[in-house]
Structures are given as C-alpha cells and as structure tokens.
Amino acid sequence: MMRPSESTNLYFNQAADQLKMPEWMRKLLITPKREVTVQVAFERDNGNVETVLGYRVQHDNSRGPMKGGLRYHPSVDLDEVRALASLMTWKTAVVELPYGGAKGGIAIDPKTLSTKEIERMTRSFVDEIHEIVGPDTDIPAPDMGTNFQVMSWFRNQWEKYHGFNPAVITGKPVEEYGAKGREEATGRGVGILAVKFLKRINVRPDQCRTAIQGFGNVGSHASKFLFESAFPVVAVSDISGTFYNPKGLNIPEMFSYSLKNGNRLEGYTGAEKLPGEALLELDVDLLIPAALGDVVTKENAGKVRAKSIIEAANGPVDPEADAILASKRITILPDILANAGGVTVSYFEWVQNRQHYRWTLDRVRQELDRTLSDAFENVWQHSATNDVSLRTAAFMLAIARVQRATELAGGAV
Ligand code: GLU
C-alpha cells in the first residue's frame, strides 16, 4: 500500500501533468516548508508519566498563514500528517481562502485517556510547539479526536506565553470566541455540495439513496442536512456497525440518540443492523465516506455499487481505487472541495476574532453557501473544459493558484 504522502503527491502530479508544470516547480510545491516532531510527556491520573509523539507539518504559506487541524488518533505519524498538511494547502486554495496548509497531531487514542489526561497532554503539546504557531503564521483547528474543549485548552496554554489572542486557533467554544456554525460546518458543507452536484447531474434529492460512513462530527451533520433536504439516507455506520433501512433512516432520531449515548450509535434499534464494511458495498446512488482515510482501496473498489462518491473524509479513496472507480464511471467529488466547509467557517471565525465582531448564524451559513457554491462551479467548469476528473480539476485550480502566489512573491523562484 502507498504511504499517505505518496497518494496525495500522485494526485498532485496528475494535475501537474495537465498543467505541464516543470519538475523543479513540482518539487518546490510538494516539499513541506517545515516538519516538527516533538516529545509530548504528561502525567497519567495514576501518577505515571506517559511519553508520546506530537507532530506539526507546515506545508506551504505562499497564499497566507498556514491552517489545518490537530488529530488525536493512533494512526497519526509523520507521513500521515505530511499528507494531510499538503491537502490543506490545496483545500484552502480551491475555495480561495487566504491561507496556506498545515496539520498536526498526536499518536494516541484519546478514548484511552481521561478528560484531565487529555488536558495535560494538550498543554504539554502546546509547550513544545507554541513558538511555531500563531494568528499570522499557523492556526490550528479541530480534526479527528479533538473538539472545541481541546481548542480552548490549546488557546489558554498558548496565551500564557504570548498574551490574549483568540485568533491563534479556530473551532473554539461558541461562548469563548468560537464562530456560530463552526461545529456543523464540515458536514453542512458536504450537504450543500451534494445538493449542487445533484442539480448538475439532473437527479432529484428524493431519488438519491445515500449511504454515509461515519457518524462523528462530519457524518452526523452531513446526514442531518441531507435528511432535511429530502435525500433518503438509507445507511449510516459508526464503530458499532452499519444501520440500514432501504426506505430511509430516521436521522433526527439517530442524531439525538448518538448525542445522548456518548456520540455512538451502539444499541440503536430503529434500523436493520449490518456489519461495518457492508456500507461501502450497498446498492445506493451516493456514497459518502466521512470517517478515516484509505477506506476504498483496490481490494474493495470493484465492489462499490454507488454511482457517485462525495469524499467527506480526507483521503478516503486511494489512487489505485480512484482508477478502478473511474473505469466504472463512478463520479467522485474530491475531499479538497467536498470537506472544505470546516476550514471555510474556521476562516470566518478567525476574521471575527481579528475584528472583535460577531456574525449571526445566518450570515455564517450564507457565506459558507456562497464560498462553496463558487468553488463548486469553478471546479465543475474546469473539469468539463479540460475533460479531466473533478479531482484533477480541483487540484489543477489549487496548484496553479499556489504556483502563481509563489512566483509573485519571488525569492526562491
Ligand atoms: N480539520 C479540518 C480539515 O481537515 C478543518 C481544518 C481547519 O478548520 O483549519 O479541513
């Protein structure tokens, strides 16, 4: 299997080939600006000291301060973070936010830690990386395994060194300089784009049977938006398995069940229960992977029966699977566009923090809709004009923008 950064760079190169980009420019754009690995040592509740590794990769800042989430997950390593950091550079460029890309994380399963332990670990991580992040350099945010509470500890610890400046991190609690609508933003963005996409292919929402892998922050909000937009959401899955109803699931009921049940669907009895892997192979119109990366590979791509895929997760389809799905004429709306709603509202949060001004939820939602719609139309047109996949079109637009900013700045080029 390819390493995550190899997969991402392969997608980059497919677009760079179309742009006839010279080798030296590819190398300049692919190579991360800075990669940091730090020791994160913290005290467990029993008094023992735990030592784990933390990472921050700052990929590119030619278009603005670097931006990207913090992931707490056992799969985190330098190569995964490197791949995710570069995806952030292309993502912010596709939706034209004035940012570059970065990503960070800690190699640990937060479910094995108490709340106090996660707090101490987060503060220790900030102690190690506080000098390289800041509102004008690199602005972290939530990702898998982190949430508004982690963002709040991060900000508090960073401010102990540098003084008041909530714009150092986004995805904060709404009561503490967070933006209204940030929590729902990635899932809502997926839903907004699904609606645009269906209009383009002339399919009515009520005819689009949809399966969503993952019922975390992204999957649950995407399900809710699609349910409210009349999509029959026939399957959703989480760590406890797949929940299926060919007539459409009662998503509002599942949403509140999961909230009350520690963000898990385990024990929900309102639907037929299938094994977790079954979701990817269901006979549906639209498949939305909204959990981990690399879930569609050459092993299972042949079994995918959906007509279209929207990549709500980062990197859910690896390049070998991408080629197989293309030969089956399955359309893919790529991650760097499909899940950009989160970082878009992070940008709105950062703007509000810097202006000491609060937007209403309506304004956040309207501007999110506008930003994603413009980006979608651009990518759709570019794909049609150049006769390339939506992924290659999105990468072409993104890397051309980063190349242009790099050339305008001069210096290295
Ligand atoms: N972690 C999210 C992503 O992968 C959001 C990043 C952000 O808001 O900066 O896009």
Image: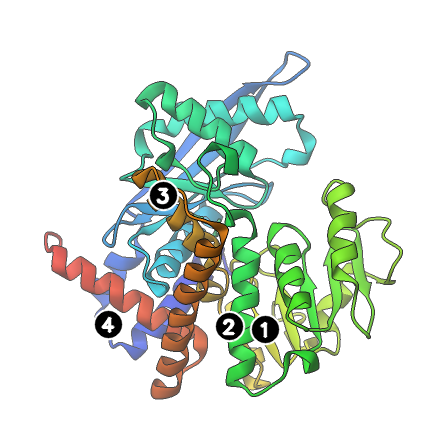
Between circles 4 and 2, the one closer to the viewer is 2
Q: Is residue 264 visible to the viewer in this orientation of the structure? A: no
The residue located at (52%, 50%) in the rendering is 181
Location of residue 292 (image quadrant): bottom right
**How far apart, in angstroms, are the residues tagged by discs 1 and 3?**
34 Å
Mark found first going from the N terminus, 1 or 4: 4
Between circles 1 and 4, the one closer to the viewer is 1
> Secondary structure under badge 1?
strand
The residue lying toward the viewer, choosing from 34 and 149, is 149
- Number of residues whose C-alpha sits closer than 10 Å to that of mark 3, classed few (under 14), some (14–19) or many (20 or more): some
**How far apart, in angstroms, are the residues tagged by discs 2 and 3?**
30 Å
The residue located at (45%, 54%) in the rendering is 364
The residue located at (77%, 42%) in the rendering is 260
Q: Which residue is mark 2?
A: 333
Q: Which residue is mark 3?
A: 352
Q: Which residue is mark 1?
A: 309
Mark found first going from the N terminus, 1 or 3: 1
